[in-house]
Image: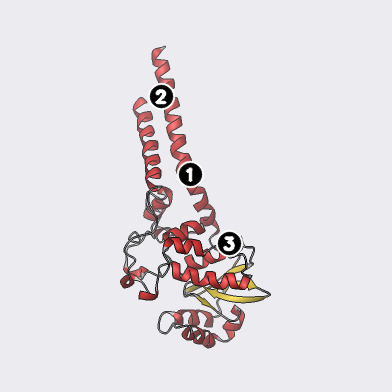
């Protein structure tokens, strides 16, 4: 039995060591050069520090001004990797073991695609990694707007995710993946999907995936979600609990093992 207690104590110590090592690491991956990015030289124009700093609201900004600027900030601060070309681990889409060993194990062994290419719901983690798809960008925008009490919904159409927000009295469609602020709400573009594509073209996106947005809107298959908590409800809470458990579990394992070893030692002395 003593051998089992010793092994569990070592396990707890190893998990704690992994966590401590993770404190010295950054989620921002290396190798984010124009060659691997969807928008090439126009992609990832903000550094990690600038991205995080720029996400804060300026005291003089109206809701519309902040949401508009934040939409561009997220687009410029999050790398648009050609994700289908690379292994999920290469750019930390599979969460590294040193960041969160629970999410890492889920990504490697659960068989659930959402954990293999993980979308953070915690804004700070999403900005630190700085890599993502439209879902990452939209959840980040939605969460940051909610922190400022700006009502918004995550909107999904086949192939794309965006945010619709109530800004200064009117509903506006925001696309933080492309960095595009549209003039009207979703219902308007369902009826005028071709106009939607024109707006993307006018903002410089021609043959860069904007047709996915138009074609998705044309289907009329639009779903609304009350923020990330509704959009990925189970994962939303699992993520937050996991960041507590990665510390709590090894502490409990070590403490329990030490107590049992001590009891075993006392019985032996008696």
The residue under label 3 is 230
Element marked by disc 3: helix
Nearest to N terminus: mark 3 or mark 1: 3
Residue in front for this viewpoint, 96 or 71: 71
Element marked by disc 2: helix
Q: What is the quadrant of residue 166 in the picture?
A: bottom right
The label nearer to you, 3 versus 1, is 1
Relative height, residue 3 to residue 199 (above, below): above
The residue under label 2 is 261
Element marked by disc 1: helix
Q: Badge 1: how crowded within 10 Å, few (<14), some, or many (20+)?
A: some
The residue under label 1 is 245
Please provide percent x and percent y for residue 252: 47, 35
Nearest to N terminus: mark 2 or mark 3: 3
Please provide percent x and percent y for residue 140: 52, 64
Quadrant in which the N terminus is drawn: top left
Q: Compute the Cα span from label 2 to label 3.
A: 45 Å
Quadrant in which the C terminus is drawn: top left
Q: What is the quadrant of residue 61 in the picture?
A: bottom right
Q: Residue at x 39, y 72 (%)?
A: 43
Relative height, residue 70 to residue 217 (above, below): above
């Amino acid at each position: 039995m003593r051998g089992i207690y010793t092994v569990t104590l070592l396990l707890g110590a190893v998990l704690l060591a992994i966590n401590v090592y993770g404190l010295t690491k950054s989620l921002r991956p290396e190798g984010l050069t124009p060659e691997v990015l969807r928008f090439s030289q126009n992609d990832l124009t903000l550094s990690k520090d600038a991205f995080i700093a720029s996400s804060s609201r300026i005291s003089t900004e109206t809701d519309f001004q902040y949401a508009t600027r934040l939409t561009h900030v997220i687009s410029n601060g999050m790398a648009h990797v050609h994700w289908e070309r690379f292994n999920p681990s290469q750019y930390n889409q599979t969460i590294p073991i040193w960041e969160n060993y629970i999410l890492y194990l889920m990504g490697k062994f659960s068989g659930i695609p959402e954990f293999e290419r993980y979308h953070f719901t915690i804004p700070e983690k999403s900005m630190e990694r700085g890599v993502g798809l439209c879902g990452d960008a939209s959840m980040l925008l939605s969460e940051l707007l909610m922190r400022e009490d700006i009502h918004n919904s995550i909107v999904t159409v086949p192939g794309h995710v965006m945010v619709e927000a109530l800004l200064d009295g009117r509903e506006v469609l925001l696309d933080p993946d492309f960095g595009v602020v549209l003039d009207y709400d979703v219902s308007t573009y369902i009826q005028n999907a071709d106009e939607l594509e024109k707006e993307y073209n006018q903002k410089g996106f021609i043959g860069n995936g904007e047709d996915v947005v138009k074609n998705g809107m044309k289907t009329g298959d639009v779903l609304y979600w009350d923020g990330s908590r509704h959009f990925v409800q189970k994962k939303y809470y699992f993520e937050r609990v996991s960041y507590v458990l990665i510390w709590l579990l090894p502490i409990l394992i070590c403490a329990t093992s030490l107590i049992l070893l001590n009891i075993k030692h006392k019985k032996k002395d008696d």
